[in-house]
């Protein structure tokens, strides 16, 4: 009996047509629609309409694209190994360069609060850009902020920016005063930082490492005890599994069936009803042959993500 | 065609502590974590001798024993990596215990079908004395193999000294041999091979048959022409823990071409360095110096043509000078 490893079970979700032809570095749902923006090592950024499973736009850059994000439904931003920070306009298929870093740019976020694009690079800087400025790097760059090490991940919530770098450093900024970090921290995890994501309610952030562990941190330690999160989040690993966790109770709520390859990226839709999963080898074992890249979009059932009510211990039998 | 001997469970095991593992990759990770780890800074090196050199150069201490090793197995002179380098008599002893049982059983079953004294070819001139097993005469027939080519050690029932001299490839002169077979020592998944220069240096054998990679490396990783495992080489300090292969790119380079030649891995706050844990953690990605994406970027197919960005920055500089001088021109009344 031949076990076909490349066909995931039907519950994995709908597979998107025309996936990238090389590793997927990130994917993001739009805040305003069911559009999905996907960046890839094949140098392209692609825009999909998930509801019709169609490719709406494609942009070719000068090198691997390492991150992308939406601005609104008509435009977004993308960054990558050609060191450039670009705005991409979907309907007209145009792009322009906001500016550059000295080394590959690893992360990009758009802050609605500040009206600025924030980028993090392996050149150890975070830069802020004003996309409304006339084109030309001198007029769009608002600031550049030196980090202790290469930037690996960024996250925004409200007026806060969390920067995670190599060497397990974490800097927390208030976007209204970038002259110095509001807090300088060290990851409480022992191994290389992989990803940082802030809680939507703005009370803190989750940090993950290459060990496969997630730490939940709070901005204000005095609030930590009282923070009322929904507390649930999804993680995807090189083992091909997506897990849903209850952070408050430190339990796993759900595990989706194994995907064909490593989970390179995850994104919930604006209403939390859909989860996009990038099944794409992430190079954890160096160069080797692997399953082709695939994007799955699955429905999220509330029962999968809602914390289970606390069970009280049974009286002794 | 001789039947290849199937060791009872095909498990690999650690020379230093005799523990068994499912596969060699896990074994290597175990050795790095338990035997090749610096006691002072917890850096994992790739061989025992590499670790010794690191401790000597960085911490100015002499390490005489391999940590967590059994008595008699703790010499830092012997070159072990995974299953490579284990002396043949030890291999025999380790697996031989399992075979002595099967020896007797198979002898009884198989003997009638093998003609006595005939036709078991001995192409390599080895002499097999018929073993006197109680109750049967066994002509040149050992369970699992009828032909014994010279080469890697085959576990044999006693007396071992019969065949030992016929296996010149293994272990008689360990340093010279082991240092010369990069493919054996470092299983690489289809990537270019690298040579553990530490093996040559540590044994005090001047590398007469010098390996493919010189000991002193360029400070900057060479990005263009070679694969990631070779590119991320750190020559400062020359810790000899060079990248091994595609499966575990664990180099301790100072990062990609982002920074100058910094010392060792990027700064980790000292009092929080990963301490030795009671349970070993096997990391899928254990390269402390670089993320997966940085490592991947070294592949030739991801090389970005820099001329454009260089031209852009030159153009910008020129534009800036022009507009500055224009401004100055206007300002000067």
Image: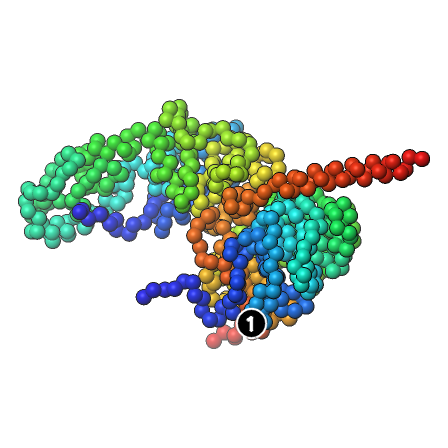
Compared to B108, does B33 lie above or below?
Answer: above
Q: Is residue A308 left or right of residue A292?
A: right
Compared to A259, does B194 lie above or below?
Answer: above
Residue A190 appears in the picture as rendered = no
Quarter of the image that includes the N terminus of chain A: bottom left
Front residue of B322/A107: it is B322
Which residue is located at x 58 percent, y 65 percent?
Answer: A55
Q: Is residue A65 left or right of residue B77?
A: right
Residue B205 placement: quadrant = top left
Which residue is located at x 21 percent, y 33 percent?
Answer: B166
- Label 1 crowd bin: few (<14), some (14–19), many (20+), radius 10 Å: some
Residue A27 appears in the picture as rendered = yes
Label 1 sits on a secondary structure element that is strand
Compared to A247, does B100 lie above or below?
Answer: above
| Residue wearing tag 1 | A299
Residue B328 placement: quadrant = top right
Residue A209, image x, y percentages: 56, 52
Residue B120, image x, y percentages: 11, 43
Which residue is located at x 71 percent, y 54 percent?
Answer: A117
Which residue is located at x 49 percent, y 50 percent?
Answer: A284
């Amino acid at each position: 009996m031949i076990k076909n490893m490349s066909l995931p079970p039907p519950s994995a979700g709908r597979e998107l047509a025309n996936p990238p032809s090389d590793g997927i570095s990130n994917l993001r749902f739009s805040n305003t629609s069911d559009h999905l923006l996907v960046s890839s090592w094949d140098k392209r950024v692609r825009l999909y309409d998930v509801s019709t499973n169609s490719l709406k736009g494609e942009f070719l850059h000068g090198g691997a694209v390492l991150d992308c994000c939406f601005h609104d439904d008509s435009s977004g931003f993308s960054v990558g190994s050609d060191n450039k920070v670009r705005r991409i306009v979907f309907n007209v298929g145009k792009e322009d360069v906001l500016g550059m870093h000295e080394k590959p740019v690893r992360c990009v976020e758009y802050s609605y609060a500040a009206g600025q694009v924030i980028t993090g690079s392996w050149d150890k800087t975070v830069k802020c850009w004003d996309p409304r400025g006339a084109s030309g790097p001198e007029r769009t760059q608002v600031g550049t902020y030196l980090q202790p090490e290469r930037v690996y991940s960024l996250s925004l919530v409200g007026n806060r920016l969390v920067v995670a770098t190599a060497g397990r450093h974490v800097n927390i900024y208030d976007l209204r005063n970038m002259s110095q970090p509001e807090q300088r921290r060290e990851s409480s995890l022992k191994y290389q930082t992989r990803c940082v994501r802030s809680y939507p309610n703005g009370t803190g952030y989750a940090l993950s490492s290459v060990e496969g562990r997630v730490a939940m941190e709070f901005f204000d330690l005095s609030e930590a005890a009282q923070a009322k999160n929904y507390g649930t989040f999804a993680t995807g690993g090189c083992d091909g599994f997506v897990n849903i966790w209850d952070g408050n109770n430190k339990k796993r709520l759900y595990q989706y069936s194994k995907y064909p390859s490593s989970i390179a990226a995850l994104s919930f839709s604006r209403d939390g009803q859909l989860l996009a999963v990038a099944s794409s080898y992430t190079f954890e074992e160096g160069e080797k042959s692997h399953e082709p890249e695939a994007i799955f979009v699955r429905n999220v059932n509330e029962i999968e993500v809602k914390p289970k009510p606390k069970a009280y211990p049974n009286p002794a039998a | 065609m001789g039947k290849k001997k199937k060791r009872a469970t095909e498990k690999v095991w650690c020379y230093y502590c005799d523990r068994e593992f499912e596969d060699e990759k896990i074994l290597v990770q175990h050795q790095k974590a338990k035997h090749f780890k610096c006691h002072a800074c917890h850096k994992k090196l790739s061989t025992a001798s590499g670790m010794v050199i690191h401790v000597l150069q960085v911490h100015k201490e002499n390490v005489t024993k391999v940590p967590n090793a059994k008595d008699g197995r703790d010499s830092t002179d012997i070159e072990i990596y995974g299953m490579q380098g284990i002396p043949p008599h030890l291999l025999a002893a380790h697996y031989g215990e399992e075979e002595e049982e099967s020896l007797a059983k198979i002898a009884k079953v198989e003997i009638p079908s093998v003609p006595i004294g005939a036709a078991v070819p001995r192409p390599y001139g080895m002499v097999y004395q018929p073993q006197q097993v109680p109750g049967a005469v066994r002509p040149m027939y050992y369970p699992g193999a009828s032909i014994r080519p010279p080469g890697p050690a085959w576990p044999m029932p006693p007396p071992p000294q019969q065949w030992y001299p016929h296996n010149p490839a293994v272990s008689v002169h360990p340093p010279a041999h082991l240092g010369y077979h990069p493919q054996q020592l470092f299983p690489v998944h289809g990537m270019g091979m690298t040579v553990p220069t530490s093996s040559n240096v540590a044994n005090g054998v001047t590398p007469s048959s010098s390996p493919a990679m010189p000991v002193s490396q360029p400070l900057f990783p060479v990005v263009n022409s070679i694969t990631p495992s070779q590119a991320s080489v750190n020559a400062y300090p020359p810790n000899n823990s060079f990248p091994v292969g595609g499966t575990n790119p664990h180099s301790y380079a100072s990062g990609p071409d982002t920074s100058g030649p910094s010392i060792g891995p990027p700064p980790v706050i000292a009092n929080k360095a990963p301490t030795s844990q009671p349970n070993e953690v096997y990391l899928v990605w254990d390269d402390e110096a670089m993320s997966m994406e940085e490592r991947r970027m070294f592949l030739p197919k991801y090389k970005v043509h820099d001329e454009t960005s260089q031209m852009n920055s030159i153009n910008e500089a020129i534009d800036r000078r022009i507009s500055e001088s224009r401004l100055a021109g206007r300002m000067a009344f």
